[in-house]
Amino acid sequence: MSATPRNASLTAGAIITTAFAGVAALAQFWTPFDPRVLAIAEKLQPPNAQHWFGTDQLGRDVLSMIMLGAQTSVGVALLSVVIGVFVGVPLGLLAAAKRGAIEELVMRGNDLIFAFPALLLAILITSVFGPGAVNAIIAIGIFNIPVFARVARAGALQQWTRDYSLAARVAGKGPLRISWEHILPNLAGLLLVQGTIQFSLGIIAEAGLSYVGLSAQPPTMSWGRMLNEAQTLTALAPYLALFPGLAVLLFVLGLNLLGEGLRRRAQGAQ
Amino acid sequence: MSHPKLLEVAALTVSIGASRIIKGVSLEVGAGEILGVVGASGSGKSMTALSIMRLLPRTASSAGVVRLSGENLTEKTESQMQAIRGRDIGMVFQEPNSALNPLIRIGDQVAETVRLHRDVTDAQARAAAREALDLVGLQGEQGSLDRYPYELSGGQRQRVAIAMAVVLSPQLLIADEPTTALDVITQAQVLSLLQKLVRARSMGLILVTHDLAVVAQLADRVAVMQRGEIIEQAATADILRRPREPYTAALLAAARLQPKRAIASAPAASAVLEVQGIVREYARKRTSLWHAPAPLRAVDQVSLSVRAGETVGLVGESGSGKSSLLRVILALEQAQAGRVSLLGEPFSSAKGADLNRLRRAIQVVFQDPIGSFDPRWTVAQLIGEPFFLLNSPLSAAQRRHKIATVLEQVGLSAGDALRLPREFSGGERQRIAIARALITEPAVIAFDEAVSALDVLIRGQILSLLADLAQRLKVSYLFVSHDLHVIRAIADRIYVMQRGQIVEEGPTEQVFATPRHAYTQALISATPELPVH
């Protein structure tokens, strides 16, 4: 056990994820062209030296659109994970700490959310509150809550059987304090892995919602809407669908590799 | 000892990566002979057993010669070895739960061994299985071929595992800690079964164990292992009487725990812990819609007391309700009936500030030296956790001083405070757990099998530390254990617990000398003893 085994998926996942995050950050300050400016004369150009990913039916630079779309994807997916973590994890910890009726209430509430078809609920929310990035975040975030609640509860229950949680009770600490001081820090690894998986699912969900027009509205760029608009032009300009599709694929792949790599590293550490 | 030579191991060396696990081990076993292999955990006992079977992990490489009846096993191919395993060499492992396939009837599991090695009909294989199960004492209804492993007790499962190992009458049987997972009474039965089989069939037996008392009872010869080497090998009686190596002598001394000398009993001392009529029931799973099932009564009307400065032992097998009782005593669980008072005040019904104040008077040390500590906390944080019970927080300097004091009391140094628990060995971790229990200057410390997970040498050190602390700090102990040797070495007075009830109590020496209850008698006679010379 002298050398740590190579963890290729962690490396690859970290590189891909960082690259996409970097592109999203860069787009805040600079894109090759301003995709909000229409240049009809340059419409539907295939990939070339000037426009690497070509231009769309309004002459906008596809690369610039994808860069700005990355911002929407990262933002929506990240915030929906944040909602899931900040609501779900405390619920899961509470269920494991209190057991009994509170646990039943929390876990059956989770079942209720899981019983709804995700897309249906998202349509419901956006049709009541109107389409937009914020409502997409809420819609996706709601589905992250039970996922994190279950992961946190399962991990916490296991730790409650350990003697150190008993020792903490002998030291007079209550279940909530023990959850905060002992259980949660030891769950961090587990939650990080789940976080990357939910992040990648969030990317797909955001693309899906914006594909049906329920997420970020123009002029905000989004990969899902680019795919939707490319649909009618597939025969004429297949690259319009190819690049945003590849972006989703690659980003999700990177996050999954990262999650798998983190999981394996956590296992190796034990 | 004129056993014909059966197994011969010469200059066996096993390496994993760059480290050598086994260094030039040589041993012999004759037909009808029992060789005990003893040593602390990590000394290479199990690895030696596995390498005889050529069952080493893939990452290991081995050198040396293993001969069974003159045939060199190290030259065999894997498929030849498969024919030898089970037919010529049988093996019994420590854990009876994982040695059997839970989904296959026990008759089929035993018969499978026969079918793999011999060209027999199903009926013949089943007949052989029947015979083997009879041989290990699972006759009639008890050992029905159609039972599943989950229907059997731990001891019965170990018997099935032995039946699988001996069904083909192998010349050699290797048993790796075969009774460590069993309670003492079952252990005695399984050991005498093994002995009978060896004598009746003139098999060779290699008995791998950490327990010298078991070896003393059973083995003809003993090999003592330390750090991958056999440091001493001789007839059992010789080793027990005249160990040549200091390490062997130390092992023997540690295994021969001296019974505690009875102190002049001081009945005048007031009770610090008083337990009265505790009943603890657990709800069973509901199986009927109409009526709730009768609850499982883990603790049934238990009363006991611990006086100031006294060490009280609580003995019982696993499942006798010791741990449930301890949780009630520590006010971690509510009892259905009865009460616990501490320093003359009600503890089980105390709330808030009173509860915290009383909690300072009783602390606990658990069995598992790994699971007792949050792996992310430093030793100082862990030991300082009970400071939470104080009404007014201590200053950082006061905390540091107190932590350093208890660390030194348990034989560690103040510099250890900033290290993490995983940097310590099992014995040192148990010292940290004791330090954590001492920090509130309690009147009573409860020990839940606190030395059961330790090697004999370390166990001896911890026990003498505890005796020393009890005397210096005038603290009382409630010492819970299944091990009679340990209880006898530390307790002034004992309670014997069976199926949730206290069946006998009294001064330790009196109970050991004249046990009144049948269960106590059975426990004492089943406990293997190292003969004293």
Image: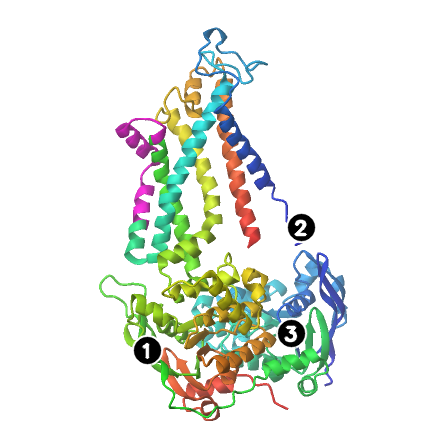
The quadrant in which residue B299 appears is bottom left
* Distance from the alpha carbon under mark 2 to that under mark 1: 55 Å
Mark positioned earlier in the residue sequence (1 or 3): 3
Residue A231 visible in image: yes
Chain under disc 1 = B
Q: Which residue is mark 3?
A: B39
Q: Which residue is mark 2?
A: A3
Amino acid carrying mark 2 in the image: Ala
Do callouts 2 and 3 mark residues in contact (Cβ within 8 Å)?
Answer: no
Residue B300 disc label: 1
Magenta span:
A107-134
* Distance from the alpha carbon under mark 2 to that under mark 3: 30 Å
Q: Is residue B495 above or below residue B114?
A: below
Amino acid carrying mark 1 in the image: Asp
Viewer-proximal residue, B158 or B247?
B247
Chain under disc 2 = A
Horizontal and vertical percent for residue B211? 59, 77
* Distance from the alpha carbon under mark 1 to that under mark 3: 40 Å
